[in-house]
Amino acid sequence: DTGVSQDPRHKITKRGQNVTFRCDPISEHNRLYWYRQTLGQGPEFLTYFQNEAQLEKSRLLSDRFSAERPKGSFSTLEIQRTEQGDSAMYLCASSLPGGSGNTIYFGEGSWLTVV
Amino acid sequence: AQSVTQLGSHVSVSEGALVLLRCNYSSSVPPYLFWYVQYPNQGLQLLLKYTTGATLVKGINGFEAEFKKSETSFHLTKPSAHMSDAAEYFCAVTPYSGAGSYQLTFGKGTKLSVIP
């Protein structure tokens, strides 16, 4: 069990560029989540996958954001035409199948700075 | 819909003193409740959770929390603070089933400082 892995850990990009983050969940975890955390705030839910199916999306996930989990294993979160307001930490998390009380394990996050 | 209010964005305690971090929640259905800890530039680590059963929940590092339905609270306590407890603490809620389950709703966090 190596934990949830995220890459890159830090990304600085110019406004208008596209960025992509990758998440590798804990093996055998079929549920995968993306959250966003800005300075001084708690994490906010973005989207949730069960296997390869994207089951829920927050209204925070604008058209510039797209998440995929093509084979039900790793996931990518792409932000197109980045804006300064996208600067945040993007957290990936995973959990085992079962009820909503199952523990959700978080990765160490990917910091995005848009300049 | 769910919401979480953490009273006090910053709490300072002396080493060896009681730690009390407050969390109140709002939920239209029975909730599952969680406390996570975040160290600087790191992700979140689960301290403890309440799902069903005993309302006093014990977690890692000597922390515990009590679910009080009548007060809609889930306060986090530790009898004796240690320097290593300095971190940010987040309370979170999710409905036990139905719409929005599997989505954690977090409070804004409480930063705990421990004074030697």
Image: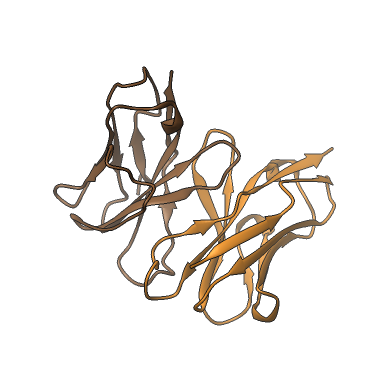
Residue appearing at x 78%, y 42% in the figure: B114
**In the rendered view, does B5 fall on the left or right side of A107?**
right
In the rendered image, the vertical position of residue B101 relative to residue A53, given as above or below: below
The C terminus of chain B: image quadrant: top right
| Occupied quadrant, residue A99 | bottom left
Q: Quadrant of residue A55?
A: bottom left
* Residue A111 placement: quadrant: top left
Please state the total of marks drawn on the protein image. Answer: 0
Residue in front for this viewpoint, B21 or B60:
B21
| Relative to B27, A80 lies left or right | left
Residue occupying image coordinates x 31% and y 22%: A16
Q: Is residue A75 visible?
A: no
- Chain with brown colouring: A
Colouring method of the image: by chain
Residue A50: image location, x then y, percent: 24, 60
Q: Examine the rendered structure and indicate whether residue A61 appears above or below residue B31.
A: above
Give chain B's shade.
orange
Q: Residue B9: x percent and y percent?
A: 71, 46
Q: Is residue B10 left or right of residue A14?
A: right
Residue B91 visible to the viewer? yes
Farthest residue to the left: give it. A71
Could you tell me residue B13's position as x and y percent?
A: 83, 47
Depth check: give the residue in front, A44 or A97.
Answer: A44
- Whether A53 is drawn above or below B115: the answer is below
What residue is drawn where x is 75% and y is 46%?
Answer: B82
Q: Please state the horizontal and vertical placement of residue B80, each as a whole percent of the image.
A: 80, 55
